[in-house]
């Protein structure tokens, strides 16, 4: 979008997200990111010692405004994420990534989000060291950092950013000594600078946001035309029963509220019977 060429955009982050976002914004919008390193942990932490006071979207908005206020720039971006079990498939971990764009001059807010299946989000209760190796391999340690704490929640020991065998061994020993039963709770460190898988997800989200900002609304001309939601109901190819797979997409403008329904972009018209609740109950 020409309006943002050669503009500085404030990125509020203390976890190195500019490494994922700077290039897409430079190549896609001609914009340079100004990193504003603020204490965003005050808004909540993945490890839970500071509970998030607002939902993810509002936290993301507050974070962006914090940086814009500190830098004096009228345009800003910030990201936020939540991780947990998939609502329909509890055994599968997913991440909900949000990236928000604010322009005070245009009174414009554009949100891009994705449900990210490619995540190493995981936790384990460590009772004996022989349980450790398979889990560490699963979560891609040591390229991806982990967090250790005593299994007893009341014990105030928390060690983050563990990415060497030595630091992990020391942390486990400390947590065992602090826990009444010698048990240790381990979890993946989901902060972007400690998690390359999440950093790649943020890059993909940044590319999607840039594409969205380059797409003007056909009704009002504001940047940000794109996918808003999907509608399920793709019919089974065998019996015609509606499935949970996407039937159509709703595209729209977050500024003026214009909305248009359109078919799936991949052109798929039917679902496989294996995904049908009637053929494969």
Image (cartoon, grey):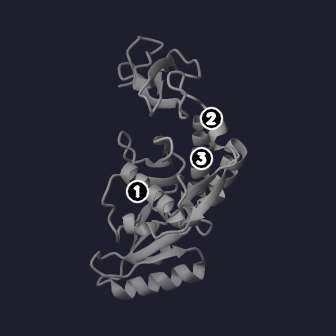
Q: Is residue 229 left or right of residue 206?
A: left
In front of the other: 133 or 223: 223
Helix, strand or loop under label 3: helix
- Vertically, is 166 above or below 195? below
Packing grade of label 1 (10 A; few <14, some 14-19, many >=20) is some
Q: CA distance from mark 2 to mark 3?
A: 12 Å
In front of the other: 149 or 78: 78
Helix, strand or loop under label 1: helix
Q: Which residue carries the number 2 mark?
A: 214
Q: Position of residue 109 (x, y in %)?
A: 46, 42
Packing grade of label 2 (10 A; few <14, some 14-19, many >=20) is many
Mark found first going from the N terminus, 3 or 1: 1
| Number of marks | 3
Specify whether residue 247 is in view: no
Label annotation for residue 206: 3
Residue under the point 29% across and 77% down = 152
The label nearer to you, 3 versus 1, is 1
Specify whether residue 156 is in view: yes
Q: Quadrant of the N terminus?
A: top right
Mark found first going from the N terminus, 1 or 2: 1
- Vertically, is 201 above or below 51? above
Mark found first going from the N terminus, 2 or 3: 3
The label nearer to you, 2 versus 3, is 2
Label annotation for residue 107: none
Q: Position of residue 135 (x, y in %)?
A: 50, 64
In front of the other: 5 or 116: 5
Residue found at the far left of this picture: 154
Q: Which residue carries the number 1 mark?
A: 62
Q: Position of residue 110 (x, y in %)?
A: 49, 40
Q: Is residue 58 left or right of residue 159?
A: left
Q: CA distance from mark 1 to mark 2?
A: 24 Å
């Amino acid at each position: 979008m020409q309006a943002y060429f050669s503009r500085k955009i404030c990125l509020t982050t203390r976890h190195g997200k500019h490494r994922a976002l700077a290039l897409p914004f430079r190549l896609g919008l001609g914009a340079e990111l100004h990193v504003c390193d603020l204490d965003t942990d005050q808004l909540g932490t993945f490890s839970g010692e500071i509970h998030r006071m607002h939902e993810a979207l509002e936290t993301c908005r507050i974070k962006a405004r914090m940086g814009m206020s500190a830098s004096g720039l009228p345009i800003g971006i910030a990201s936020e994420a939540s991780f947990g079990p998939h609502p329909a498939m509890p055994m599968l971990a997913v991440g909900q990534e949000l990236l928000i764009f604010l322009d005070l001059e245009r009174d414009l807010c554009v949100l891009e989000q994705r449900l990210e299946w490619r995540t190493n989000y995981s936790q384990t209760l460590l009772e004996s060291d022989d349980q450790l190796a398979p889990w560490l391999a699963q979560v891609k340690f040591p390229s991806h950092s982990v967090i250790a704490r005593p299994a007893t929640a009341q014990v105030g020991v928390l060690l983050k950013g563990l990415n060497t065998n030595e630091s992990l061994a020391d942390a486990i020993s400390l947590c065992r000594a602090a826990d009444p039963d010698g048990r240790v709770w381990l979890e993946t460190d989901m902060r972007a600078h400690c998690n390359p898988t999440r950093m790649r997800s943020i890059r993909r989200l940044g590319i999607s946001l840039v594409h969205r900002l380059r797409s003007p609304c056909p009704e009002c001309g504001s940047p940000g035309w794109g996918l808003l939601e999907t509608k399920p109901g793709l019919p089974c190819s065998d019996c015609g029963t509606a499935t949970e797979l996407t039937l159509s997409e709703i595209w729209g403008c977050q500024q003026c509220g214009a909305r248009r329904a359109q078919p799936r972009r991949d052109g798929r018209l039917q679902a496989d019977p294996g995904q049908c609740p009637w053929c494969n109950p």
